[in-house]
Image: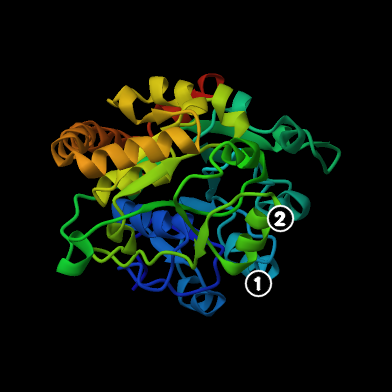
Amino acid sequence: MENQSKTLIIESCEKIIESDFSNTSIVHVRNSVIIKEMLGADLLSHASQIESLMGNNYDSIICVYASPYMKYKTYMRIIENNMDAKLFWLVNDHDLEDNILLRNVVKEQGRKYNVICNNPRSGYRHWILGKKMCGKKLDDWIDEWHTVNLNCLIYRPSKGKKTLLTTNRSGCIYFGTFRKWRAKDMIHFNGLNYTISTSKKNTSKYMKAGIKARYVDRLSWEVGAESLRNFKYSIYFEDKHTHDHYAFMANRYYECVMCDVLMLFDSRCSNTIKESGYNIPKELIVDNGEQANHVMDTLDEAENCYKYLLDRQRENCKEIIKNKIKTSNYLKSILIERRKLWQQPEEVGSVSL
């Protein structure tokens, strides 16, 4: 019997993903699972799954992120089997080069595709959109551009299933891949008493850039038992480009709210804080590591102040849920309901939410 799903998500991680995230720490992979469940879509994340999906006809195919190591030639089979499907690239990073599978589609089939992104078209790296491709610029091969808050999808009201992870919290953590465009900002926080969680490969990049911290392996994101819960504080950094090109709060913010980890902010992120609309107390905005240490030491000694600021952070949960519903509804409108956006091309060159 033919599958009733009309949307296919192709995730480039080359791993069959567990729905509880017990075998992945990669945020775009986790988002793919969330969007799959939201849309009732099929998820293709390993080449071994292709054959079972070849009999399905899809209205929409979403290619997620852009791993250059993807076995794109193998995945072309399912693209070729769905020549009428509308193609999308879903990405939440302004600094990422084009998806290699979609690049191959352009070269072999001359098909345009659409983008779903945290960044508006004008905020994406111009040198990437200006890349030459088949006699045109990459930007010429992109039709609709949908700007939407993808990062808030990661948020989920959480009930920790391991008591150990919700008690005796301590320390401050920053987590994620090394980003060269935020390294200079992070240098201002040398002296901060904190841990950076990342891969061994990225640890060497952080250290080479002169960023001083304790380093540990990547966090576990198993649903309800996220190891982020062991920490009391986190610190928010962003790329220099993002200071002036708003792209919503990073995934890390929503993960910290979800795990009840109090987040401090680098003051250079003030525009993002303002544009987000979330209530971020000024006491949590700091210029350097010395200030951040002072804030955390003060809050450790004054438990009532810590609880007060944590409650202020929790107050943002209702707004986050509203934003997640808004994003969900928007994705459904362009991928399932096929509303007027697809019928009025003069209005969809750049669409924002």
**Which residue is at the front of the view, 101 or 339?**
101
Which mark, by number, is residue 122? none
Residue occupied by mark 2:
208
**Which residue is drawn at the image coordinates 56% and 44% (left, top)?**
190
Circles 1 and 2: CB atoms closer than 8 Å? no
Which mark, by number, is residue 74? 1
Q: What kind of colouring is applied to the model shown? A: rainbow
Q: State which quarter of the image contains the C terminus.
A: top left
Number of the front mark, 1 or 2: 2
| Residue 98, image x, y percentages | 68, 47
Q: Is residue 139 left or right of residue 56?
A: right
Q: Is residue 63 left or right of residue 314?
A: right
Task: Report helix, strand or loop for mark 1.
Answer: helix
| Residue 197, image x, y percentages | 48, 60
| CA distance separating discs 1 and 2 | 37 Å
| Residue 94, image x, y percentages | 60, 38
**Which residue is drawn at the image coordinates 76% and 55% (left, top)?**
108
Please tell me in which quadrant of the rendered image residue 182 appears: top right
Neighbours of disc 2 within 10 Å: few (<14), some (14-19), many (20+): few
Residue 246's place in the image compared with 47, above or below, is above
**Which residue is drawn at the image coordinates 27% and 58% (left, top)?**
229
**Which residue is drawn at the image coordinates 50% and 52% (left, top)?**
62
Q: State which quarter of the image contains the N terminus.
A: bottom left
Which of the marked residues, 1 or 2, is nearer the chain's N terminus? Answer: 1
Task: Report helix, strand or loop for mark 2.
Answer: helix
Q: Is residue 4 visible?
A: no
**Which residue is at the front of the view, 265 or 108?**
265
Give, as a three-letter code, the residue at label 2. Lys
**Which residue is at the front of the view, 29 or 76?**
29
Q: Is residue 261 visible?
A: yes
**Which residue is at the front of the view, 136 or 256?**
256
